[in-house]
Amino acid sequence: MKTKAAARELPAAPALVIDGHSVIFAWKELRDLHAHSPNQARHLLVERLRQLHDSGAWSVILVFDGRFGSRLDRIEPASGDMVVAYSSPDCTADSLIEGFVARRRDRQRVTVVTADQAERRTVEALGAWCSSPEWLASELVERQGTLVEALGRIHRKARW
């Protein structure tokens, strides 16, 4: 049996920092939705990523260029919570992401998802990993499958 102290020693999930609009415009379904309802496209992306965050595989941080929601000039994740951040008017999502990566001591445990090649080069130069929106789509499918399998095993054990 694990004690509370042992549970605290477990490493946090690696950070997955997502350039929200980059993903929206890379995924056809969200891009089409964004054309007539930008808020719905953002909301749908948040809901999909919440499932990924809740799987425990990643600590998800979703960053949008500001104009909507709360505006930040620095990302400060709260323990265990998924972060949805909007940059302040004088700051871009890219600069928020770069600042977050630059402040991290464990940059090798940070993966940034973006289709922006300049952003990829900057983040990789800072020591973090980069992945594409296409990779993110496959990660969502894989994690959903893993979750369904785990729930099936739990359900089968409960019947015995």
Image: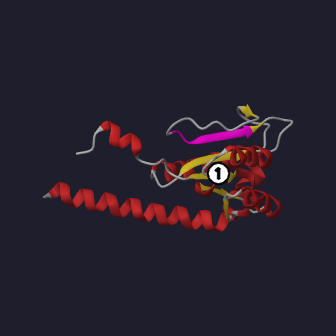
Question: Magenta stretch: dominant SS?
Answer: strand
| Closer to us: 130 or 128 | 128
| Closer to us: 48 or 139 | 139
Q: Amino acid at mark 1?
A: Val
Residue at 41% across, 63% down: 146
Left or right? Give the position of 100 relative to 160. Answer: right
Residue extending farthest front: 105
The quarter holding residue 120 reads bottom right
* Mark 1: few/some/many CA within 10 Å (<14, 14-19, 20+): many
| Closer to us: 30 or 82 | 82
| Closer to us: 14 or 140 | 14
Left or right? Give the position of 94 relative to 60. Answer: right
Left or right? Give the position of 145 relative to 159. Answer: right
- Residue, disc 1: 17
As drawn, 75 above or below 101: above
* Location of residue 101 in the rendering, given as x and y in whole percent from the top left corner: 69, 49
For numbered disc 1, what is the local secondary structure? strand
Residue at 48% across, 47% down: 12
Q: How is the image coloured?
A: secondary structure
* Location of residue 35 in the rendering, given as x and y in whole percent from the top left corner: 78, 54
Q: Which residues are magenta?
A: 81-86
Q: How many marks?
A: 1
Quadrant where the C terminus is found in the figure = bottom left
Residue extending farthest left: 160
Residue extending farthest top: 70
Quadrant where the N terminus is found in the figure = top left
The quarter holding residue 100 reads top right
* Location of residue 155 in the rendering, given as x and y in whole percent from the top left corner: 24, 57
Q: Is residue 43 magenta?
A: no
Q: Is residue 85 magenta?
A: yes
Residue at 73% across, 61% down: 124
* Location of residue 90 in the rendering, given as x and y in whole percent from the top left corner: 87, 36
